Amino acid sequence: MSTYYGMEVFDFQRVGSREGSIRVYAGWKGKHTINPEVAKTVAWEEKRGLFKPKTWAEFRDRVNKNREKFIKFSHDAKRKGLRVVADSCPGRGTVLVNYYGIDKTLMPYIAQLPESEKVGKFLPGTHIPVVANDIILKEQPDYVVILAWHYADFIMKNWRAKGLKSKFVLPLPEFKIIPK
């Protein structure tokens, strides 16, 4: 296993609430006992091409295609006078909205659970206000973008049970519009 800056990975934990993420523990080479699972995980990553530039180039291309689809969708919706808002405001959603270049002219607000500390604030880098999510049910916008796409099934089911008629938009892992 390779080392960088005189350090090596000696352990990791899978973070279940973070959709496949792992927490990595690294330290000075030779100072820690290396968990045997580390080598197994590195072998798994190698088998899937995660150390090959081609794999990351393909990933970059997929990300850019999703971005292009979402931007086209957003501009087309605005041109047609359709209302596109977002639900949920996790950190990954903040990164996505900023990377996609979405601002309050395309997405007038992002709704969040009313008890969230984010309500009453703005999404960093965009000036999009974060509001209590009861507004979605009152307004029945044309589209609701699910920024917590890793919980999309749960979120959509709850909204439908409350009577939301909007179409849902999943920005990732593949851009998709879920009809009414």
Image: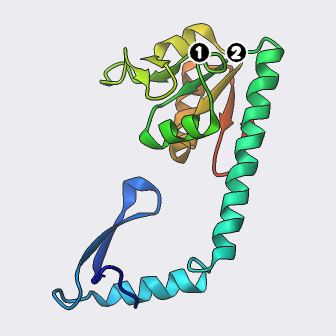
Q: Amino acid at mark 1?
A: Pro
Visible residue check, residue 93: yes
Residue 20 or residue 128, whichever sits in front: 128
Q: Amino acid at mark 2?
A: Arg
Q: Which mark is residue 127?
A: none
- From this view, report whether residue 129 is shown above or below residue 159: above
> Is the C-beta separation of discs 2 and 1 under 8 Å?
yes
Name the image quarter holding the N terminus.
bottom left
Relative to residue 5, is residue 65 drawn left or right? right
- Counting the numbered discs, the total is 2
Q: Position of residue 62 (x, y in %)?
A: 72, 57
The quadrant in which residue 50 appears is bottom right
Mark 1 lies on a secondary structure that is loop
Q: Position of residue 92 (x, y in %)?
A: 48, 44
The quadrant in which residue 59 appears is bottom right
Q: Which mark is residue 83?
A: 2
- From this view, report whether residue 141 is shown above or below residue 64: above
Q: Of marks 2 and 1, which one's residue comes earlier in the chain? A: 2
CA distance separating discs 2 and 1: 8 Å
- At x 28%, y 84%, the residue is 6
Q: Nearer the viewer, mark 2 or mark 1?
A: 1
Name the image quarter holding the C terminus.
top right
Q: Which mark is residue 108?
A: 1
- At x 51%, y 11%, the residue is 135
Q: Position of residue 89 (x, y in %)?
A: 45, 32
Q: Residues within 10 Å of mark 1 (few under 14, many from 20)?
A: some
